[in-house]
Image (tube, helix red, strand yellow):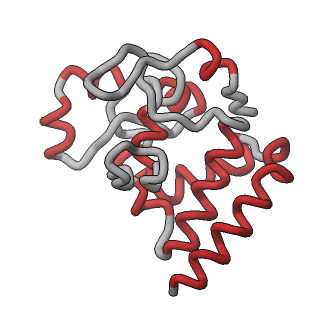
Amino acid sequence: MKLNLISAVICAVFAVPAMASDVTYRNDIAPMIKKMCSECHGPMSPSLADFSLDQEKFKKDKQGPKTDTYADLLQIIGWPDSGALMRRLDDGTNAADKKPGNMNKYLGETDAERAANLAIFKAWLGDGAWNLNRWAKRGDVPAITKDQLDKLKLKY
């Protein structure tokens, strides 16, 4: 099992630079979001603004903010909820506590599938754009910088 994960990670690491310019929202990210996220983050889900007003109610109903459009997704990547997508999908390698984000488990059924799908998200964001920072510093999580925002590619 560990050998399969190691193989998948090695393949993903070397494949990311080659595929980075080819990953698009339309062809790669939207189908993945629809397949893995739409049950809780689909078209019937609240907007980020509505979700922010009553998070506990929506969490109780097993609904998160809508991510079924490019514009909705950008809100949890760049602004106003900077880095939320990355914090949720991270495999733990970028987190101070080394714990995977709470949505990482939905990236696939196996460690290898999760690693491969995470690599696709990272490639879509852009080289060096994967970070867990927020718009404004909160606790141990620093504010996102202009340099970090400039790295976002998010090809449609």
Q: Where is residue 55 in the image (x, y as percent from the top left)?
A: 19, 31
Compared across the picture, whether 13 is left or right of 144 comes to right
Residue 28 or residue 150, whichever sits in front: 150
Residue 148 or residue 121, whichever sits in front: 148
Query: Which quarter of the figure has residue 84?
Result: top left
Residue at the image position 42 percent from the left and 53 percent from the top: 92
Residue 88 or residue 96, whichever sits in front: 96
Residue at the image position 35 percent from the left and 17 percent from the top: 137
Residue 103 or residue 65, whichever sits in front: 103
- Image quadrant holding the C terminus, namely top right
Q: Where is residue 40 in the image (x, y as percent from the top left)?
A: 34, 49
Please determine whether, in this image, residue 37 is positioned above or below residue 111: above
Residue at the image position 52 percent from the left and 32 percent from the top: 73
Residue at the image position 31 percent from the left and 40 percent from the top: 64
Q: Where is residue 2 in the image (x, y as percent from the top left)?
A: 52, 82
Query: Which quarter of the figure has residue 52?
Result: top left
Please determine whether, in this image, residue 27 is positioned above or below residue 51: below
Compared across the picture, whether 22 is left or right of 78 comes to right
Q: How many marks?
A: 0
Q: Where is residue 23 in the image (x, y as percent from the top left)?
A: 76, 46
